[in-house]
Amino acid sequence: MLRPLRHDGGASPAAIRIVRIATLPEGFEDLAADALGDGQRMLEVLREDWQAGTLRFDGPGDALLAAHLGTALVGLCGLTRDPYLPQDRVGRVRRLYVLRAARRAGVARALLQAVAGQAAACGYPRLRVRAPVSAFGFYESCGFLRAVGEKAATHTLSLPPKGT
């Protein structure tokens, strides 16, 4: 298990490596166990969906990104078309989780920035997420706005048009 990385607000951005992945990566089991220990089932759901073939982040406009510090897997975040808005082409942030020992090191922000970049490259005009109340401040610090009156979302982020 990793120890907290730094107490002054983050690791060097160069130390965080974000990669797009096509399979559940080495270290996934440890990350999923950490999530369960944190009371979060999102990575168990990701594993179940992956094994069933119902969501593998391999459709048009989908991506699954992994964050590494050194060789250690410290976070995951996915992007899909928002299934709650089937008539619209809107991206959805899925399964963002960062290892507890790697929090406050900029990992979640780096993952979210990479997902937003991927979403913009796919032509999504905006992203939506349904976040727990404890994460509202984080998403708002990343530029997301509260999604007032929107079904199945707490926050939304407008993205620049593709190619800008």
Image (tube, rainbow, N blue to C red):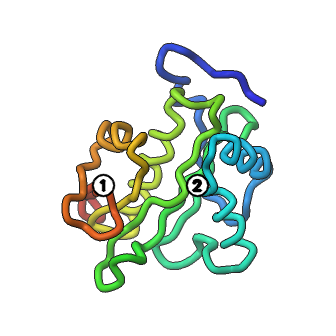
Rendering coords of residue 60 (x, y %): 49, 78
- Where residue 1 appears, as percent x and y from the top left, is 78, 30
| Label whose residue precedes the other's in the sequence (1 or 2) | 2
Q: Residues under labels 1 and 2: Cα distance?
A: 20 Å
Quarter that holds the C terminus: bottom left
At a point 63% along the width and 55% down the height, the residue shown is: 41
Amino acid under label 1? His
Residue appearing at x 33%, y 71% in the figure? 90
Give the left or right position of residue 159, taking residue 44 as reference: left
* In the image: residue 28, left or right of residue 9: right
Tag 1 residue:
155
Most extreme residue toward the left, as rendered? 148
Residue 117 figure quarter: bottom left
Query: Of 92 and 122, which appears nearest the observer?
Result: 92
Q: Which residue is mark 2?
A: 65
95 up-or-down from 8: above or below: below
Q: Label 2 is placed on what type of residue?
A: Leu
Select label 1 or label 2 by which is in front.
1
Count numbered badges in the picture: 2
Q: Residue at x 53, y 36 (%)?
A: 107
- The disc at residue 26 is none
Mark 2 residue element: strand
Which percent across, then down, holds residue 31?
A: 71, 45
Determine which quarter of the picture holds residue 141: top left
Q: Secondary structure at mark 1?
A: strand
26 to the left or right of 80: right
How crowded is the residue under tag 1: few (<14 C-alpha within 10 Å), some, or many (20+)? many
Relative to 2, say whether 49 is above or below.
below
Furthest toward the front, the residue is: 39
Residue at 29% in and 70% down: 151
